[in-house]
Image (tube, rainbow, N blue to C red):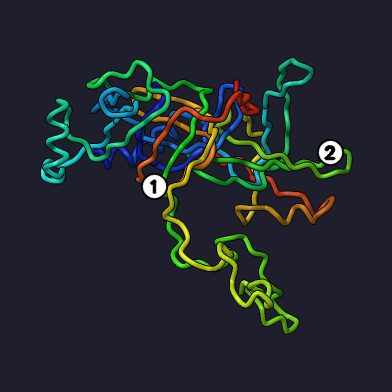
């Protein structure tokens, strides 16, 4: 009995911290991440929109990396999906990609960095 | 009393109230029973002995079984004495994770993981030699010191058995104390393998400030 409890404590902690629901999306999709930022002692919500290039980890440790090109400069931000600082995530576009981690996007500029959009399934 | 025995469950990370993700070691701490209260008058020193962990009846030596019986305590797997921070502990009392709270600073004693017969690089953080360009000294300890002395000085760091030592990690922060699950979450790593016995006690480091990111 002791052993079975030992095996579970970490799983339980993990479950405790997971959010009830996270929208369904995968790498290649374009998402809007609304995260809380503290600026000058005040908290506000900041939106970051871009392509999900990496989605990794499991349980409460799952994280995503979102990439966007801002003023000609590539910016990548990673978020812990279940972090209380990540307020919510909205999926704005579905992309068609053939791998799970889009590291190749970092080297691509302009037209080559486009991702085909998935047509909505009826 | 901020002393307890526990079992290392493993590591994970949790989110604190301000949204930070901190690495923690999960320790199944207690419940421990106070088997004996030793006093300076009777035993020559002050101490409290705590017992922890379920054990089959036949596994307790009769000497120890008699000791438990004398003190009216249930036999447990591990017994350890604590000599600091023992005010208000009476024999027969129970110590649980509830005696700790988030933000407390503790020292943790464990038996470090065994590395077998290890070389100087792993055991003493030697630098090692070059890998190529005819170096010929790769992971060797190289010089043993003064050749005029004609002997190796005492205490010279050499390859040898590494690990399985009693190791204390001081000044760890308690991130969370969960009395319901008998679980302590300590920030950072703790010596020893999973399922190893760990001794948690209030830190001896004086006037330590709370860690960054603590509430």
| Disc 1 to disc 2, C-alpha distance | 46 Å
Give the quarter of the figure containing the N terminus of chain A.
Answer: top left
Secondary structure under tag 1 reads loop
In the image shown, does B15 or B157 lie closer to the viewer? Answer: B157
Q: Residue at x 70, y 54 (%)?
A: A103
Q: Residue at x 82, y 52 (%)?
A: A111
Which residue corresponds to mark 1? Answer: B194
Q: Residue B150, position in %: x, y?
A: 62, 77
Which residue corresponds to mark 2? Answer: A70
Count residues near mark 2 (Cα–Cα under 10 Å), then give few for <14, some for 14-19, many for 20+: few
Which tag is nearer the camera, tag 1 or tag 2?
1
Asked if B192 appears above or below A42 in the picture, the reply is: below
In the rendered view, does B148 fall on the left or right side of B53? right
Count residues near mark 1 (Cα–Cα under 10 Å), then give few for <14, some for 14-19, many for 20+: some
In the image shown, does B9 or B97 lie closer to the viewer? Answer: B97
In the rendered view, does B66 fall on the left or right side of A87? left
Q: Residue at x 40, y 24 (%)?
A: B178
In the picture, the disc for residue B114 is: none
Q: Residue B69, position in %: x, y?
A: 12, 30
| Image quadrant assignment for residue B145 | bottom right
Pointer 1 with pointer 2, Cβ within 8 A? no
In the rendered view, does A95 fall on the left or right side of B118? right
Q: Residue B34, position in %: x, y?
A: 27, 25
| Image quadrant assignment for residue B52 | top left
Asked if B191 appears above or below B126 in the picture, the reply is: above
The tally of labels here is 2
User: Disc 2 sits on a residue from what chain?
Assistant: A
Secondary structure under tag 2 reads strand
């Amino acid at each position: 009995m002791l052993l079975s409890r030992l095996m579970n404590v970490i799983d339980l902690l993990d479950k405790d911290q997971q959010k009830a629901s996270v929208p369904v999306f995968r790498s290649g999709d374009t998402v809007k991440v609304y995260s809380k930022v503290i600026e000058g002692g005040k908290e506000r919500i900041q939106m970051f929109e871009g392509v999900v290039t990496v989605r990794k980890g499991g349980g409460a440790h799952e994280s995503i990396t979102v990439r966007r090109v801002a003023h000609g400069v590539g910016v990548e931000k990673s978020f812990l999906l279940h972090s209380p600082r990540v307020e919510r995530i909205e999926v704005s576009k579905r992309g068609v990609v053939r791998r799970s981690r889009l590291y190749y996007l970092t080297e691509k500029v302009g037209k080559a960095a486009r991702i085909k959009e998935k047509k909505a399934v009826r | 009393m901020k002393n307890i025995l526990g079992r290392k469950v493993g590591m994970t990370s949790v989110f604190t109230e301000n949204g930070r993700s901190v690495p923690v070691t999960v320790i199944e701490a207690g419940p421990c029973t106070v088997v004996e209260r030793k006093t300076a008058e009777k035993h020559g020193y002050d101490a409290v002995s705590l017992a922890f962990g379920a054990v089959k009846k036949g596994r307790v030596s009769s000497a120890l079984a008699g000791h438990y019986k004398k003190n009216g305590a249930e036999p447990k797997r591990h017994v350890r004495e604590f000599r600091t921070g023992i005010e208000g502990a009476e024999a027969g009392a129970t110590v649980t994770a509830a005696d700790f709270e988030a933000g407390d600073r503790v020292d943790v004693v464990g038996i470090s993981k065994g590395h077998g017969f290890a070389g100087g690089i792993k055991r003493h953080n030697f630098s090692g030699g070059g890998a190529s360009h005819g170096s010929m000294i790769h992971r060797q300890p190289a010089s043993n010191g003064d050749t005029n002395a004609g002997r190796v000085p005492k205490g010279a760091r050499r390859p040898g058995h590494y690990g399985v030592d009693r190791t204390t990690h001081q000044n760890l922060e308690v991130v969370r104390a969960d009395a319901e699950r008998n679980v302590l979450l300590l920030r950072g790593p703790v010596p020893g393998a999973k399922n190893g016995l760990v001794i948690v006690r209030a830190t001896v480091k004086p006037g330590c400030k709370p860690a960054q990111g603590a509430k």
